Image (cartoon, rainbow, N blue to C red):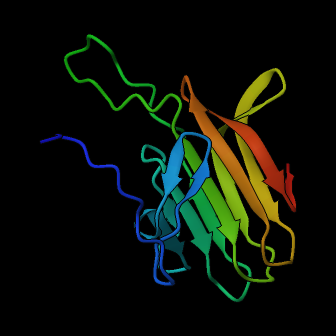
Amino acid sequence: MSLFRNEAPNLGPTSDVQMKTGAHVLLSKDITILSAATGAINPNSQATYVITDATAAAYTLAAPSKGNVGSVTPGFPSDGKIIIISSSTAAAHVVTITNLEAGASTSAGTATFAAFAGASMTLMAYAGTWLVISSNGVTFA
């Protein structure tokens, strides 16, 4: 008797679909809806956020934690964590990002989503800063 079975999965019309973005597998449970009621984005949790407000809204993404390795009160080191923010509406949403790496300096910046559905940006945490991995329809200031 074999311990392994070589069977093809049943891929019928009700099969789940998974999308991979980098090393992060996105399932429906990984998507967080952003609306004016929620506002803030968790900087220390890898997630995908979808903005659903029909009118322009403002959001905040704080600096990711650097953690304190070996400290008495360690934080959550978030290096390598990826946050994806996208818009499902045609409104110019603004996300204020703390510790956005911009050239040679690190400062607060804003990301304005152009007024069309599908605008998105992907950010990665590194040493307490946010690095822009990709953006589509987003302007940074």
Q: Nearer the viewer, residue 48 or 105?
A: 48
For this view, does 138 lie left or right of residue 61?
Answer: right
Side (left or right) of 94 relative to 2: right
Q: Residue furthest top?
A: 70
Query: Eyeballing the image, is 44 above or below 75?
Result: below
Judged left or right of residue 87, residue 104 is: right
Residue situated in front as seen by the camera: 48 or 100 = 48
In the image, is 71 to the left or to the right of 30?
left
Residue at image location 55% in from the left, 79% down from the top? 35
Q: Position of residue 33 (x, y in %)?
A: 51, 74
**Residue that lies at the very extreme toward the bottom in this rendered image:** 54
Q: Which residue is depicted at the point 85% across and 49% down? A: 141
Q: Position of residue 130 (x, y in %)?
A: 64, 36
Q: Position of residue 6 (x, y in %)?
A: 34, 49
Which residue: 17% across, 40% down? Answer: 3
Residue 131's quadrant in the figure? top right
Q: Residue at x 32, y 14 (%)?
A: 69
* Residue furthest to the left: 1
- In the depicted structure, whether residue 10 falls above or below residue 104: below
Q: Quadrant of the N terminus?
A: top left
Quarter-wise, where is residue 29 in the image?
bottom left
Nearest the eye: 50 or 75: 50
Query: Across the whole image, how many numbered discs are drawn on residues?
Result: 0
Expressed as whole percent of the image width and height from the top left, the position of residue 20 reads 59, 51
Please say if 102 is above or below 28.
Answer: above
Q: 76 above or below 47?
A: above
Residue in the foreground of this view, choosing between 26 and 10: 10
